[in-house]
Amino acid sequence: MQMQDPIVLRARGIGKVYPGTTALTDADFDVYRGAVNVLVGENGAGKSTLMKILAGAERPSTGTLDLDGTPVSFSSVRQAAEHGISIIFQELNLCPNLSIAENLFIGHPLGLHGLKIDHAEQVRRAGAVLRRLGQSLDPKMLVGDLRIGQQQIVEIAKALVENARILIMDEPTSALSATEVDILFRIVAELKESGVAIIYISHRLEELVRIGDYITVLRDGRIQARAPKADISVPWIIHQMVGPLESALTPTIHHGQSVVLQAEGIALIGPQGSRVVNDVSFTLRAGEVVGFYGLLGAGRSELFECIMGVHPTAKGKITVAGKNLAGLALPDRIRQGVALVPEDRQREGLVQSMSVGANLSLASLWRLTRFSRVSKVLEKASVQRMIRSLWIKVSTPEVEVTALSGGNQQKVVIGKALLTLPKLLLLDEPSRGIDVGAKAEVFRSIRRLADEGLAIAFATSDLKEVLALSDRVLVMTEGRIAGEFTRETMTEEALVAASTPRSHAREAA
Amino acid sequence: MKIAQLRGLSLGGGTSLSLPMLLISMRTFIALIVVVLFFSITTPNFLTPSTLIILAKHVAINAFMAIGMTFVILTGGIDLSVGSIVGLAGMVAGGLIDVGIPINALGVTIYPNVVETVAMTLAAGMVIGGLNGVLVTKLNVAPFIATLGTLYIARGAALLISNGQTFANLVGTPAYGNTGFPFLGSGTIFGVPFSILALVVMTAVAGYIATQTSFGRQVYAVGGNENAARLSGVRIARIKIAVYVISGLCAAFAGLVVSSELVASNPASGESFELNAIAATVLGGTSLMGGRGTIGGTVVGAFVIGVLSDGLVMMGVNAFWQMVIKGVVIITAVVLDQVQRKMQRQMALQAQLASA
């Protein structure tokens, strides 16, 4: 028998451009059969983009896919599934009101071409697949009655029913307990044995080293490094993900400056009834840059939103420059000197239909208006000043904001916040989705603004960023402040350890 | 360059795209020129001053409503109640002139003068608009449903005022000091009909509000990206209530002019006018998604519809065909709008790929 090619899927030169950003550039990626192929990288490194392209959810702007030696291109997830590529998204795609068996066969019901569904056969086959996965679940159970870990197994079963040869798993353990993680890993090992290729994406580095066979590190939309597991370690991955620290950004520490923000006992109940922000207290001084580090969902964005006044139900006392903000709505807080650069530039930062100039002045129209007319002279002067001081690359301020690159769009959002003349600047993931060069420029601006006397808080899940930019780091986990670090005590390892949720810290110990 | 070829987007340089882009972005104006030319050639008497004045007076009624509608649609909303407000406004004005305000306790009736009548009628329109705004913002009712509700309420109120009867002969009584109402519809200033002058003034004022004021800027921001606007300190509810009040005001003004022209007010007046107003707005390039559009575009759009309607009548085209033709024109406008968006997106991506 002929020797089989160990690589089942080859991606070559994959690139993906979104309006305003380049998510992925010239990425080569090999998927080995019967192995766990790990994709790792920081937020915005391009993992999910690459994964969506492989699964047919997005079309690449450039490059080719080669499956078993044949070029393929997918226009939908459905089409990729027909080629044996299945994906399990972080948010599970199951119908809670249907049974396990019905969910497994929802795409291709068994029976007379959809005229009459053969329920008995579906239940029998579903039972067989679940047994193969070592599960004794009744296929007639409603999916809504299953625990989240069991639902994940149903998703895997669904992929197997569709004869998946390549299974993409996006952060599959993020919602699982330690026991459920063990079950999942056993299933992954069995799937590997049977020749299924697994593409595994996760933030949890210990996990990747535990089950991965080939590790691929993405950074800033490019493939940074590739290696078989045997050759590498966790520190190697961190180094590849983060890259060398930039010395140019070494912070200057300010002492004895006045307190700008005093936050006491800030709390917010989320839509699911959980405490998204849980009794957070801290102070911020003029000229200080404080990093809020934490994993996704740690409550950083929500904390900033509470300070900004986005959530009227938030509890706690917030004082900015000596003034209590209680009862003040968001527009009044802007006038008191609070400014927020939101995490999602497209959804919350920019008005896409408006020009660069109109976006820049939007939050400070109250300063630029004379007799309810926007003063052209004042507006133009402010806009020009901001374009110059932030080095926004634009021919004229009349250009529509969507025509700018991601980095310049981000500068517009920052510039909009600065034009309100804030005392306190809150930046939520300020470097998200922008190119490396633009990142450095944005950081230099942040540093300069602090030197000019602003108090700056920024949230990030990027280690390199938080280490390079902060005078002080507060680590958030599950809505609480889990640790505070100074220049002397902040190290990669310490921050990662502090940011690990307690339920998982037990498992790692 | 290599990338553009891979995607099959290489259309031979950037300049070949810009001429069609220019034509598409000026499509409403071009359409107006085309319909005017068409009727000038095919229909004798079309290009005479008297025809054009009658045409402009017809257009003015729709344009008043469409200008108010533009503010609402710019925020991403819709106002279906404007036709009913036209009817209600006529009935309020007609009632005040013909019946007055009877005060039973004192056994007297107050007859407001024409200026007071106009003010009260406009206020009635603003109240309905304010109701729309509160429903949309404070009670979170979808604009389509909220204004569909007030469409019925305002029409019902119009019928209730006179129990379904028409108020005729709205000339007022010299003894009561309430004469002069017909001026709105048939008066002239320096030989120009009042309603045409009103259209010019309203276009200028609305254009100023939309482009020069802080309020106008915030209207565009709310429609362009409500989340971003909120985080930039725009008081969303205040802006939205204001645009519905403006729309109610404009519709009430249209109602005054309609009943003044007829010197009578009928509770059924203005039925389905809201559709003309929406059509003019959309035809004028305002996006139903909000955030994009101009007052000038809307007025041109109202003229396209007006020229088309009157021209087809003068040509003797069957009334049923007129409706079909109007529908085709409106759909074509929206399709072209989508084509323009798509071309702009593609050009932006192409430029980005080329620079990468």
Image (tube, rainbow, N blue to C red):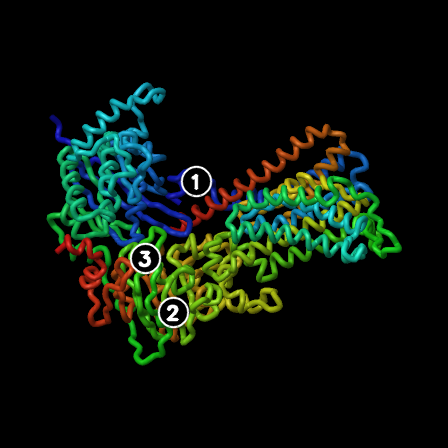
Q: CA distance from mark 1 to mark 3?
A: 46 Å
Q: Which residue is mark 2?
A: A318
Disc 3 sits on a residue from what chain? A
Amino acid bearing label 1: Leu
Label 2 resides on the chain identified as A
In the image, residue A389 sits, relative to residue B225, either above or below, namely below
Q: Name the N-terminal-most of marks 3 and 2.
A: 3
Q: Secondary structure at mark 2?
A: strand
Residue B9 is marked as 1
Left or right: B196 as drawn, with respect to A152: right
Q: Position of residue A450 (x, y in %)?
A: 36, 72
Rendered location of residue B105, percent (x, y): 76, 56
Q: Residue at x 20, y 57 (%)?
A: A502
Q: Which residue is mark 3?
A: A276
Residue drawn at point x = 81 percent, y = 51 percent: B181
User: Mark 3 packing: few (<14 Cα in 10 Å), some, or many (20+)?
Assistant: many
Q: Are marks 2 and 1 on the same chain?
A: no
* Amino acid type of the residue tagged 3 in the rendering: Val
Please say if the residues under marks 2 and 1 sit with CB atoms less than 8 Å apart.
Answer: no
Residue B192 seen anywhere in this rendered image of the structure: no
Tell me, yes or no, whether dots 3 and 2 are on the same chain: yes
Count of marks, rendered view: 3
Element marked by disc 3: strand
Proximity of marks 3 and 2: CB atoms separated by less than 8 Å: no
Q: Nearer the viewer, residue A373 or B140?
A: B140
Residue ID at (76%, 50%) = B93
Q: In the displayed image of the protein, which residue is found farthest to the bottom?
A: A256
Marks 1 and 3: which is nearer the front?
3
Residues at discs 1 and 3 both on one chain: no
Task: Give the amino acid at mark 2.
Answer: Ile
Is residue B188 placed above or below A93 in the rendered structure?
Answer: below
Instruction: Name which residue lies at 72% across and 47% down.
Output: B255
